[in-house]
Image (tube, grey):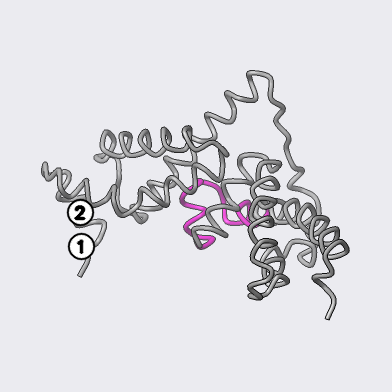
Amino acid sequence: MATDDLTLVKRVRGGDQRAFKLLVERYQRKVYAVALGMLKDKEEAMDVSQEAFVKVYKYLDHFKGDASFYTWLYRITVNICIDIIRKRAGAGGEAVEFDETLPMDVSEANIGALGSRLGTNPQKSALRRELAEKIQEALASVPEKHRAILLLREVEGMSYEDLSRTLDIPKGTVMSRLFHARAKVQKILSQYLELDEAKSGVGSE
């Protein structure tokens, strides 16, 4: 049976290097996936993964244990990514923000419905791969704070409560940002699917 995270943290604090290695092995792929989703650069994502665990080790005494270890780890990872994205923007990139006060139309932000439209037909595997690329492109167009929340919710499956703790924002802000991120990606992907179905006849019987 796998040792739980808090037990491993206690062992690391006691000088157990193997316990830290187990934590790294447990979460390094997820940390890399989050970083890659935000930065769209494999080398930068690898650097972020390493930096995140260096910070975890350095500041482990600051981890209070009132939230889960992975929530704390993801907060560190997302903050590193946001710093990188802001540096990019400062070097000539353009930061775009959403107006979170706009009314929310839930019917326009159901990103989960997009994947189901492709079904599981093997003939559509190439289309699904292409869709995955379009999802990455769509995510790249979303501001960093919305991109982070969408990745952590849709890819990592975090609850609203965990997102609130990870990003240190109210639950209502979590829901607002998540809505706007989904709406943005939904719009881009819907346009792509409509064009592709018209071209390939995917939507026909």
Q: Nearer the viewer, residue 44 or 20?
A: 44
Q: Nearer the viewer, residue 163 or 181?
A: 181
Can you tell which quarter of the image residue 98 is in?
top right
**Residue annotated with mark 2:** 8
**Residue annotated with mark 1:** 3
Q: Residue at x 26, y 33 (%)?
A: 58
Local crowd at mark 2 within 10 Å, few (<14), some, or many (≥20)? many
Can residue 161 be found in the magenta stretch? yes
* Residue bounds of the magenta highlight: 159-176
Q: Residue at x 20, y 62 (%)?
A: 3
**x and y percent of residue 22 in the render?**
23, 52
Mainly helix, strand or loop, the magenta region?
A: helix
Q: Residue at x 67, y 40 (%)?
A: 143
Can you tell which quarter of the image residue 14 is in?
top left
Can residue 130 be found in the magenta stretch? no
Which element is circle 1 on? loop
Give the residue type at disc 1. Thr
Name the quadrant of the N terminus. Answer: bottom left
In the drawing, what numbered circle is on residue 135?
Answer: none
Quick one: label 1 or label 2, which is nearer the N terminus? 1
Name the quadrant of the C terminus. Answer: bottom right
Q: Residue at x 54, y 36 (%)?
A: 41
Residue sticking out furthest to the right: 198
Query: Separation of disc 1 and disc 2 at Cα?
Result: 7 Å
Local crowd at mark 1 within 10 Å, few (<14), some, or many (≥20)? few
Residue sticking out furthest to the bottom: 205
Give the residue type at disc 2. Leu
Q: Is residue 94 above or below residue 181?
A: above
Which element is circle 2 on? helix
**x and y percent of residue 43 in the render?**
47, 33
Disc 1 to disc 2: CB gap under 8 Å: yes
